[in-house]
Image (cartoon, rainbow, N blue to C red):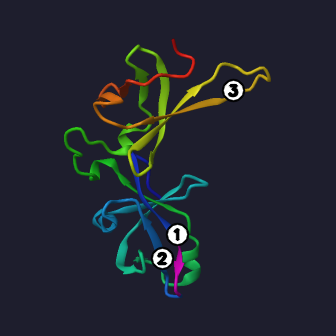
Amino acid sequence: MVTASRLVSIGRIAGPYGVRGWLKVVSYTDPAENLFGYTPWRLRNLQTGVLTEAELSAHKPHGKGWVVQLAGISDRDEAALLSGREIVIDREQLPSPGRDSYYWADLEGMAVETVAGLQMGYVDQLLETGSADVMVVVARDSDRQDGERANKRTLVPFLLNEVVLDVDLEARRIKVDWEVAGEG
């Protein structure tokens, strides 16, 4: 077992492939084969959060995806136990993104505020829509009548210099030119 540092998800185990312990994988990298340039892999069990280190023995394209063999996994039953595991690496393994480029993992959790100074919440996740990436910004609503609290979600396009005016990685803050419902 390994301990968690700042981890970034780069793919997931989709399930077993064949009877000799091969696994189907889904890559979150672009291009997809960049997945194999990062070692070691850590496999995160999404139910328990437990991380285990995995050594990649072989990989090959299969259809529109990829299959891999991990050291120590030699049959379908062992491979099936890894289904659904997330493939993660240490953030420090990624190259510097360059000017006005950001890794989604760096943006998640950052505070979001409008140019008027209104605190919108934090970046819960980002979505790829085709035309522009979209931040899902979550803020706590005030207590509802039933005493429960609800999360208010706002979708904000990640358009640099149009909507997103400043990304301060050090301060963990994103400033946006975006009108919030009920503002003003």
Secondary structure under badge 3?
Answer: loop
Taking depth in this image into account, of 117 and 179 the one nearest to the observer is: 179
In the rendered view, tell whether residue 102 sits above or below residue 148. Answer: below
Dot placed on the residue nearer the N-terminal end, 3 or 1: 1
Report which residue position mark 3 lands on. Answer: 149
Query: Distance from label 3 to label 2 (Cα)?
Result: 41 Å
Report which residue position mark 2 lands on. Answer: 23
Count residues near mark 2 (Cα–Cα under 10 Å), then give few for <14, some for 14-19, many for 20+. many
Residue 27, how many percent across, how many down?
Answer: 40, 64
Taking depth in this image into account, of 115 and 24 the one nearest to the observer is: 115
What are the residue bounds of the magenta stretch? 14-18
Query: What residue is rendered at 55% in x and 27% in y?
Result: 139
Query: Distance from label 1 to label 2 (Cα)?
Result: 7 Å
Name the dominant secondary structure of the magenta segment: strand
Q: Which mark is residue 31?
A: none
Count all numbered tags in the image, as a single digit. Answer: 3
Secondary structure under badge 2?
Answer: strand
The answer to the question of whether label 3 and label 1 lie on touching residues, with beta carbons closer than 8 A, is: no
In the rendered view, tell whether residue 13 sits above or below residue 97. Answer: below
Report which residue position mark 1 lands on. Answer: 14
